[in-house]
Amino acid sequence: MMHTRSIRRRLREHAGDQRGFTVIEVLATTMMVAAVSAAMAVGLISIAFHSGDQRRRSQAAQIAQQDQERLRGFSAEQLNGLNQSRTVTLNGTPFTVTSTAAFVSSTGASSCTSGSAAFYRIVSSVNWASNSRTPVVTESLATPPAGGTLLVQTIDQTGAPLSGVGVTASGPDYDTGITGATGCTVLSDMTPGNYAVTATETGYVDSNGNSSPPGLSATITGTGVSLTSVHPIQLGLAGNISANFITQATVSPVSCPPSTGTCTGQQSDALSWFGNGSSASMSGYASSTLASPGTLIPAAGTIPLFPFWFTSTSYASNYQVWAGKCQQNQPPTGVNKVSVNPGSTQTGLAVQEPALNVIVQNNTAAKANKPVVWTPVKPAHVRLSFLSSSGNACSDSWQAPIASDAATDINGSLAYPGQPFATTATTGATASASGLTGTYAVCADYNGYQSTVNNVQNNNFSATNPVTVQINQYTSSSGTC
């Protein structure tokens, strides 16, 4: 009997153990089913996403093809520099369509520098918000229409493509264009013949400071691609300047601050300049003139200058400026060097002039047979006449204002002793950077008599350059300067 109860007890314990295993097995099975279900759900979602992505890519390809057909119907003017974006909605999905066109050679390379036969590469790019891959892109070549084609390329001072430049060709036909990202524009379907071409962009100038380079021309033929007479056309964002004048004269309480010995507010009737860089330079010096000497040049506004650059894109000391309208007035190398950066504005640049100390004396003897006694006087007029003695002929002449204390001022008779450079030296510290020479004729008159001193130099920037004009009423000519 005892044995039977023991067996029954062990059977009950074994049944309890089995019930525990059954719960664990059920839990494990449930977890496995959940995992398989999740995996299947992810797979189904992935398949659905992939299917949707493929459908949208297929729709995008269809839109791209339609855009290609649309672009093939464009005129040359419409294709020129085309960069257009628009939205096309298909089956509820908005697609962004970007259409571009570029002029290329028959080999497919950029023909911006070539006059060979060329085509338009038309590109249609389609994208949508949920796209995680690259856009769908379709491209092809389109043949330009029959007739002449003019290719115009513009670059900046560094040689990089310059976009946004307006181009006009006038001749047997007329057309306009705007350069694109590659610096190119193409005028197509033009009547063959000779054309005048302009290229302009607000704030930009060529190497000689012209806002529209002069002399641009083109001969357009009936086949192939023609180029402008200057190719590529170089323009740079101008730096703008205006100038005042100073001089280092002998210290005077009237015109120069004793603490510095620098006379400000000097005058000139012209400002000249020359600029150059590592690969380009002006074709010749240039100048801006006034009707009569003034303290500011130009009298209003500024002068736009091309930003010449050197290695490592440096614009340091790319110009030399000077007072006077002649190249012979250019001072020695290193004097009045200016840095003109793209888009910069420098007003009232201090341009140094050497000081011309004009002393006027009169013979105060009462009679011709009396000893000559020279007395400093205030002249009625002083005329300075510059004349070149080498290089291209150049001359200038002006009446210089007279100082109120001309008879006693240690800086002489001139209210503004600073005057344009003049030298006979061809080498050394007093030679012009141009290597050219020229001198002054200094005329003064007093009490109706005049006298002139010729071959006067004004080439010392650290001290005054003295000249004495003596008027003798018994030997000098009558008249005024």
Image (cartoon, rainbow, N blue to C red):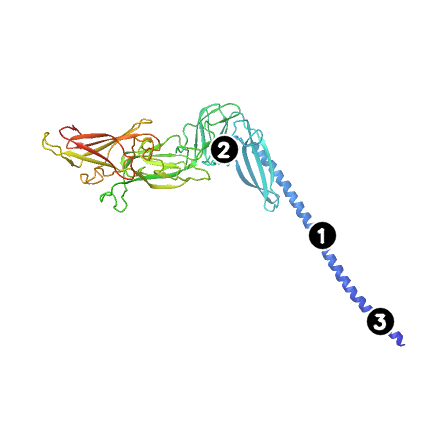
* Quarter of the image where the C terminus is located: top left
Q: Which one is nearer the viewer's eye here, 410 or 3?
A: 410
Q: Quadrant of residue 256?
A: top left
Q: Which mark is residue 184?
A: 2
Question: Pointer 2: residues within 10 angstroms few (<14), some, or many (20+)?
Answer: many
Q: Which mark is residue 10?
A: 3
Q: Earlier in the sequence, mark 3 or mark 2?
A: 3
Q: Quadrant of residue 95?
A: top right
Q: Position of residue 446 (x, y in %)?
A: 16, 33
* Quarter of the image where the N terminus is located: bottom right
Q: CA distance from mark 3 to mark 2?
A: 99 Å
Question: Pointer 3: residues within 10 angstroms few (<14), some, or many (20+)?
Answer: few
Q: Amino acid at mark 1?
A: Met
Q: Which residue is mark 1?
A: 40
Q: How many marks?
A: 3
Q: Position of residue 154 (x, y in %)?
A: 47, 33
Element carrying mark 1: helix
Element carrying mark 3: helix
Q: Is residue 205 left or right of residue 383?
A: right
Question: Pointer 1: residues within 10 angstroms few (<14), some, or many (20+)?
Answer: few
Residue at image coords 46%, 38%: 311
Q: Is residue 62 left or right of residue 265?
A: right
Whether residue 254 is situated above or below residue 184 in the rendered picture: below
Q: CA distance from mark 1 to mark 2?
A: 56 Å
Q: Position of residue 29 (x, y in %)?
A: 76, 59
Q: Amino acid at mark 2?
A: Cys
Residue at image coords 17%, 35%: 361
Q: Amino acid at mark 3?
A: Arg
* Of the two numbered discs 1 and 3 in the rendering, the one whose residue sits closer to the viewer: 3
